[in-house]
Amino acid sequence: MARFTAMTSVRTASKVERLGSSLTALRRLILYLGVTIPLLPVQLVLVALRSPLARRLPRVYHRLCCRILGFDAAVTGAPSTVRPTLFVSNHVSYVDIIMLGAVLETSFIAKAEIARWPFFGWLAKLQRTEFVDRRGFRAAAHRDAIHRRLEAGDDLVLFPEGTSSDGNAVLPFKSALFAVAQDTVRGRPLTVQPISIAYTRLDGLPLGRALRPYYAWYGGMTLLPHLWTMLGLGTVTASIVFHPPVDGIAFASRKALAEHCFVVISAGVQAQNRGRPSPASAALPPPEAGAAPVGGAGPDPAAAGAQS
């Protein structure tokens, strides 16, 4: 059975490669650069002037990128309207930045090495990314830097897996940066909202386990070949589920908050990957405090269905 599954996966992947078009990839790349390069100096000036438009332009830019690159977001639930909010999401691919950036006016928390990447590192800096070193001895300094950003009113997206996954399951969360949610921000509890993201359809057809690596970027994959192959494919749908937000201080510890987010996000990813409908249900309450979700979004559309 395992051999049959492996052979089927190889045949399916080869079929997708044949369907991929180098002309489509080239056209998309030219259009992408044609939009990105002129906007780089504009965003640079906006950031230097600390203009409010420096927060807004990236969302417009990511929406344009989605149209150019063949990305479609299917959104369930509603983003928190409380500012600031710490959004917590699983991480599948560099494509997550474009997809989430198209639906949220936000900055991201990313690994420090991304700041040194050619071109993509520049883009990350211009979106006012908060770069962190995952080594433990820097955790306190990074927590304080994130707290200052939140105090300034910036929404942030945290990828607590610390790396990207294959998209089939969520990796264990690192809890160190959840400590920022144990403090008040602007005199009130920090709002934390879990997000599940999964790449579920290609040209309207289910995107199964064998095809997901064309969009998931993980392990030892090389960036440029992966990007080129992906650009030559059709339109991919990313299912994005906004789960009910919670107050960070409603949990007894950062680890309890991290566990809550992990359970909710994992359930959402499983439901999306299995193509299940998203029934409404209440978010899992913090086990220590029994606290209810805070305002700013509707009931959880995925957790119960994934666990049934």
Image: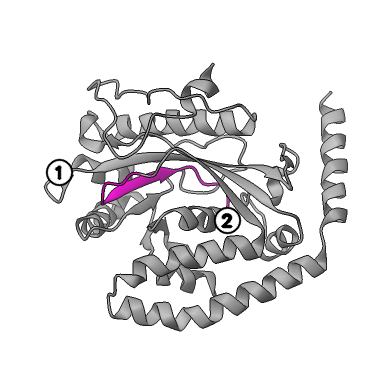
Q: Quadrant of residue 58?
A: bottom left
| Residue 95 - label | 2
The numbered mark, 1 or 2, whose residue comes first in the sequence reads: 2
**Residue at 70% over, 69% down:** 28
- In percent of width and height, residue 114 lies at 48, 64
* SS at mark 2 in the image: helix
Check disc 1 and give the amino acid type.
Arg
Q: Which residue is farthest left?
A: 187
Magenta segment main secondary structure: loop
Residue at image position (51%, 46%) is: 91
Res. 167 image quadrant: top right
Q: Quadrant of the N terminus?
A: top right
Horizontal arrangement in the rendering, residue 249 relative to residue 193 (left or right): left
Residue at horizontal 47 percent and vertical 26 percent from the top: 303
The residues colored magenta run: 80-94
Residue at which label 1 appears: 188
Q: Secondary structure at mark 1?
A: strand
- The residue at the point 14 percent across, 43 percent down is 188
The answer to whether any part of residue 223 appears in the image is no
Task: Give the alpha-carbon distance from disc 1 to disc 2, as whole Å.
Answer: 33 Å
Residue 22 drawn above or below residue 210: below
Where does residue 21 sit, x and y in percent of width and height?
82, 62
Residue 285 shown left or right of residue 36 in the figure: left
Q: Quadrant of residue 131?
A: bottom left
Within 10 Å of the Cα at label 2, are there few (<14), some (14-19), or many (20+) other Cα atoms? some
